[in-house]
Image (cartoon, rainbow, N blue to C red):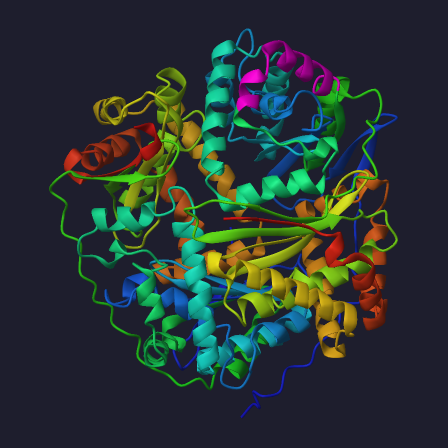
Amino acid sequence: MINRAIAPELQTIKHIDFLKPKIFDISPNVHLYWNADVPNDTSRVDLYFDAGTILGTIGVASFVNGLLLSGTKTHTSIEINESIDALGGFFESGVSNENAVISVYALKENMMPVLRIIRDAIHGASFPEHEVDELLNDRKQKFLVNMEKVSFLAQRAFQQRLFSESIYGRVSDLKDFDSISRSEIVAFHDEYYLNGLSKMVVVGDLGQDAVDHIIDLFGDWSHAHQPTFEKNIHNLRGTAHIVKDDAVQSAIRVGRMLFNKTHPDYLDFNILNTILGDYFGSRLMSNIREDKGYTYGIGTMMAELHASGYFLIATEVGKDVREATLAEIQKEIDILQNELVPEDELELVKNYLLGQLLKSADGPYSMTDLYLSVEPYNMDMDFYNKAIESINNITAERIQELAKKYLNWDDMTIVSAG
Amino acid sequence: MIKFERFTLPNGLTVLFHKDVTTPLAVVNTLYDVGARDESEEKTGFAHLFEHLMFGGSVNIPDFDAPLQLSGGESNAFTSNDITNYYNVLPAVNIDTALWLESDRMLSLAFTPKSLEVQRNVVIEEFKQRYLNQPYGDVWLELRPLAFHTHPYKWCTIGKEISHIEEATMEDVKAFFGVHYHPANAILCIAGNFELEEIRDKVSKWFGDIPEKLKPARILTAEPEQTEFREKILERNVPTDAFYYAFKMAERRSDGYYIADVLSDCLGRDKSSRLYIALKKEQKLVSEIGAYISGDLDNGLLIISGKLNPGVTFDMLDNALWEALDELKKSPMKESELNRLMIKIRTAREFQEQGLLNRAMNLCYFELLGDVNGINEEHLIYQAIQPEHLQETAIHLFRKENCSLLKVKSLSND
């Protein structure tokens, strides 16, 4: 008989091979990154543009992003989508504060023809009036639906207060949708897409010829210089509540401006972040979900911008326990500031983080994404070896020190909705 | 081609092994052949609540998650109307930890009152977060009982109402475990860089001494053939009118299932689909529209849903929608369109099979369907679909008396 009360012996992960993609220079500040090590027929190509929401009139960045395949002088949006679908291609486009990303997924045999269609569609985009009107209408409807969600209301108010005076704090209102002009759309597209390409990524066993061809297809969109990004953004401290009468839950957002991967405290703080709220066994999950049953989920995260970053706690809880939840969050932070993390908990989190790092390096797509998350900061895969070091060397004293330094309740922006 | 080995333990546990030499990770996936369709109508939401309790400690191990996290792994689970699936992803060197934990909770749970009390609250908050506190969130709570009158698909996995979750007792929990959680009712898949013999030894070691029980017989009330058009209107505080057309379709194990899947792609998967082009781009009736299948094991639903543009009435939409459906019934699909749908299905599958966890889950699911190798043959069923099959199935599916329509009317539009 086996003794089930005794856990099997564990091995600790000591080393992970982090493989960097091949780098091709398109211009002094635009590069293509290629990971060919894909053992099957799938492939992905990403194009990054300086076309984030901090640029232009409010809303225009997101609009242009939604209209990239909306038609040219010779092809309608329907024809463009049909021809991509006929090759089994998947086109995704998204926009964040600082950039816009297009991702194309296809079997490798179809990738090049799909990319040619996309190149022609974006290059020749003529922004037909009916397409602009249609997107305007769709976006307004989506906005109205979102405004019914407490999570959206809280996130929106949080963003305003976190980024306060900065351009990052802009949020759309319904009226903004009507104020975007066609000429602004055309100008934004020309400046930030056709002259705004900042990097390209290829994952897949496509061959050198294909990669050369991708550079030919898109290289002329390269931007002339790196954009600059705002530093020293300060969050508005204190509490705000958005009333939504018919809500049965309240959404809560607590956070502050912090730093990104370039900061010397980043890696160690990430361990503190995990202990507090970034895994299923975290302090916040254990208390607010698994002990009190106030929520389906609560989590913390570190978000990064080019020249800064922020820390965030997010949850949705029963309306009647909103204040109680905020008090418990504050209590958990107090404990981290005043008591050392017990050794067994620290060991668990260290092993967990090493396991997660192993997982995030598993397979060519994940490995490429790891590289893409350090590349903007001019860092290399060595960052992850440093992460392993940080995990191995962390102490309970260091965690407490960081909690005291960065998690003071008075420094937080606190928002709730519902 | 996804390779696998299959063996069974004397106590009835079915084990699948999928070897992947490229990964340092291991997946341990356990599918239990129990879902919300196995609940009684007075105690709905139980299979899902039970899934939460499976993380509340087992007979010899007080906490499930902590030892797994200590081994560098993580775990989660989901419940559907048909199945409950648990998965662990961890460094392959520590696979024994996952087998130890997973086997101990198959042996028996800790059944602590605190766990039940807390998870009842957690699930109630989940109910609120997903179904009550979202615009259009209660649609499935309403659509299911409209489309199904006798089959247990008439309630949602989360449960019919919050009171059912509030009233769950420890006796219910123990009884449910006794009937559904044992080797003969489970399928285990292990994926990673191992040898078959190694896996055989490990699984026998950890799972071999769990007592054998009989697989419970499943007797479900069949849903009688629908013979009348059904419609329900909800008035809600939402910004725009929304519609949900639900057509009864074939069960998972039949060819008709795959044909309906292709029909739903044709109607509303991509921006080149028929409804997207006709109703959104050309006639400008909707701001969004899509079509998909519910993916149920028993006879399920093909759903067409979307939101109306301002000034458009439900009748205008209804006319245009039926016109598009009639077109599918009248003329066989052109080859170019069928080819387009097929390449999308093939491409999506290749990307899905990339993930180790997906492969392990799918292997278990195909074993449940009756033939694990079906995972490698499914594409042949799709490839064999001809325009006349689609036309035939469209004629059978897209009839008013096979349709349940749920309208969500915006109160602010009055």
Q: Is residue B382 above or below residue A19?
A: above
Q: Is residue B31 above or below residue A178?
A: below
Q: Position of residue A256 (x, y in %)?
A: 73, 49
Q: Position of residue A174 (x, y in %)?
A: 52, 26
Q: Is A183 covered by the magenta stretch?
A: yes
Q: Position of residue B323 (x, y in %)?
A: 24, 22
Instruction: Judge left or right: residue B32 versus residue A344.
Output: left
Q: Is residue A28 above or below residue A340?
A: above
Q: Residue furthest top?
A: A73
Magenta residues: mostly which secondary structure?
helix
Q: Residue furthest bottom?
A: A1
Say which residue appears at 32% left-offset and 55% top-offset.
B156
- Nearest the eye: A276 or B370: A276
Q: Which residues are magenta?
A: A175-195
Say which residue appears at 33% left-offset and 58% top-offset.
B81
Q: Position of residue B311 (x, y in %)?
A: 33, 20
Residue B331 in view (yes/no):
no
Say which residue appears at 53% left-offset and 14% top-offset.
A71
- Nearest the eye: B240 or A96: B240
Instruction: Judge left or right: residue A157 versus residue B327.
Output: right
Q: Is A370 covered by the magenta stretch?
A: no
Q: Is residue B156 above or below residue A127?
A: below
Number of numbered discs: 0
Figure quadrant of residue A235: top right
Residue B50 in view (yes/no):
yes
